[in-house]
Amino acid sequence: MGAAANRAVTLRDVARLAGVSVATASKALNGQPQVRAETRARVVKAAEQLSFSPNTLAQGLITQRSGTVGLLTSDLEGRFSIPILMGAEDAFGSDQTSVFLCDARGDTIREKHHLRALLSRRVDGLIVVGARPDTRPSLGELPVPVIYAYAPSDDPADLSLVTDNIGGGRLAVDHLIRCGRRRIAHITGDPGYGAAQDRARGALDRLAEEGLSLAGGEVWFGMWSEAWGRGATRMLLDRCPDVDAIFAGSDEIARGVLDVLHEERIDVPSQVAVIGFDNWHVLAANARPPLTTVDLNLEQLGRTAAQRLSAAMDGTPVSGVETLPVRLLTRESTAPLR
Amino acid sequence: MGAAANRAVTLRDVARLAGVSVATASKALNGQPQVRAETRARVVKAAEQLSFSPNTLAQGLITQRSGTVGLLTSDLEGRFSIPILMGAEDAFGSDQTSVFLCDARGDTIREKHHLRALLSRRVDGLIVVGARPDTRPSLGELPVPVIYAYAPSDDPADLSLVTDNIGGGRLAVDHLIRCGRRRIAHITGDPGYGAAQDRARGALDRLAEEGLSLAGGEVWFGMWSEAWGRGATRMLLDRCPDVDAIFAGSDEIARGVLDVLHEERIDVPSQVAVIGFDNWHVLAANARPPLTTVDLNLEQLGRTAAQRLSAAMDGTPVSGVETLPVRLLTRESTAPLR
DNA sequence: TACGTTTCTGAAAACCTTTTCGGTAGCCAC
DNA sequence: GTGGCTACCGAAAAGGTTTTCAGAAACGTA
């Protein structure tokens, strides 16, 4: 594979080839004004000829900026971190900032290790992505700015970016109401998750505004799995056979819901509308029928994280919790009643 | 969040606090022998007190090693790259090598951009992960060693690491045969994928050894989707109602297969055994029943990639295509006939 | 011609660490 | 008291780049 260990070409090589000093070469390549056009051209040509690329390490050493930020995640599947990473990369754009992704796998000592590694590589900032949307311990005072994304920090002095779970719950129910549904049930995951509580809260709020209450009488908390989605749906149909819409707290649960409805020959969406949460593409798009769901806008979250981080790196101190809107993605599992 | 822009502490600060020169401090911290135990202790204490962490950029500048490798992927979902990343991190372990993940999103110009960024950060090596398990264009001659993982390079002078799709096909069919099945069908994805061809090839080989041929008469090529899994299964049941096992070319397809079997009240595994491919956890583990599947061993792939890369970085030139074994993961969708 | 001005170039310092090599101090033996 | 060890420490160079500042060259003006 051609180890091709020919020593990397340095600015000195370029300067020599162009017949100038390294100082001039540097200025020529960086667009500094105090260099004659003709000289600049010569340097640029030489650089291209040698396919020179500046040593970022050396640059970082003197500018005190490494041009890298760390993305520290605990997310084994990459379900959240990859979209956030893409958003962040987008926002930093080609302005020579790269993003370092480290996966701590939910392990505190691995997290510490990665943190040390990132810090010793002099990252200019840090984005911390939690595995679940609940508060997580703050990393404390660090020599670089930190943004917590998805899972907020427990220290209000930090800046956290979270998705709007309450708003998402409202949005889902609002959509169902607009579809003419009145007997709406909510099946969701582990009640220990703040996200489950918030989504339920949003749903209940919107229902109350309409003078409605939950079909089935209560929120069906359980687990974040298809199996629970199936089990809860069976119980729900038992207790409340005239339900006309189900809001599932996650796409996994929604898959279970759809499964049982299908089994019972209940048509979706004409008899019962189903809406999920997360827009986990492989689950939602492949569902039968394709699943209307609440998209978390994770790329946007990543972009915003990058922007806030840029601001913080430029010295504007930031803190608090910022809630980012989610959006409805309609597919075929919901439709107006008539 | 405490921008805490207090200038990072340097070795000079440590030395000053310990009352020694920077040279001595360096030697003390790096375990060099020519420093008195008492002095070393003083330096170590000072370093801890200031929570000093050496500037990797400066270190890299003189050792000519950045202690980072790049992981260049085209995989939007993170389905492949995250496990490979974890395996690679494992293999490099805490021996101060970090892994830089960049997502090119299947876009050539983005790939070029990331490549430049990585190279200018002086990564010590590169792992390139393709989006699909087919050959991809070589990056050509680079100043650092490169390993192609998952998708092999089209240049035989490169080193590529791929999963054993033929072996996987054999393994799947072998398992079904051991379960006493004789009328085995194969539903798989896009025939344009080498992986689809290889898996089918392995399956056919193993069947031939047993003197069997494929139930349904042919391989059912189609698309990598649940919908195709459903459609193909319906056709299959139509043409060949006595089938007793189905080998699906991916877990997504297998989900479709299970769906239709369930719909037709055909019990899995007692009447028909089903096996998938990929071990995409959210799909396979949540299936009804949980899906026996072929695990790609991607973490192992990542570990091996890291090892080969280390070897290459140490000067051993490597090339060719290395095929890594996959393994069977039995859940409940397969079982002996009786 | 002498001087001031403008325009361009280069030497050198700085960033932080590692490593080499010379130097100092202490010790022992003569 | 001298020479020769050993054990320890520090000055300095190196790595590649940017930036500052001084100097050189070219030009115009008096």
Image: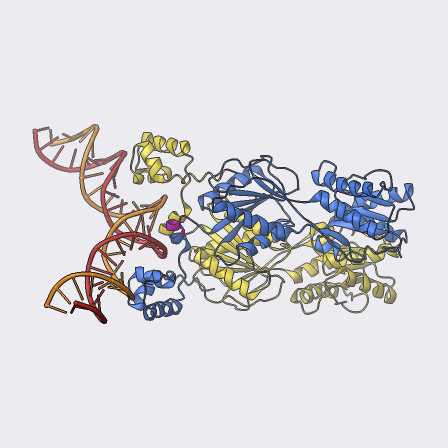
Chain colours: A yellow, B blue, C red, D orange
Q: Is residue B69 above or below residue B19?
A: above
For this view, does A144 lie left or right of residue A216? left
Residue nearest the viewer, comparing B173 with B52: B173
Q: Position of residue D11 (x, y in %)?
A: 23, 57
- On screen, residue A260 above or below B103: below
Residue at x 82%, y 50% (from the top left corner):
B176
| Residue B277 seen in this snapshot | yes
The answer to whether residue B147 is left or right of residue B122 is: right
Write the start and end of the magenta stretch as one range: B60-65
Image location (x, y in percent) of residue B78: 63, 50
Q: Residue at x 44, y 43 (%)?
A: B120
Count of number-bearing discs = 0
Quadrant assignment, res A31 = top left
| Rendered position, B3 above or below A16 | below
Using the rendered image of the protein, determine whether residue A331 is visible from the camera's viewpoint: no
| Residue A13, horizontal then vertical, whole percent | 35, 37
Predominant SS of the magenta segment: helix
Residue B329, image quadrant:
bottom right
Instruction: Please tell me whether residue B63 belongs to the stretch shown in magenta.
Output: yes
Q: Position of residue A291 (x, y in %)?
A: 75, 51
Side (left or right) of D21 relative to B314: left
| Residue A223 horizontal side relative to residue A154, left or right | right
Asked if the stretch drawn in magenta spans residue A282, the answer is: no
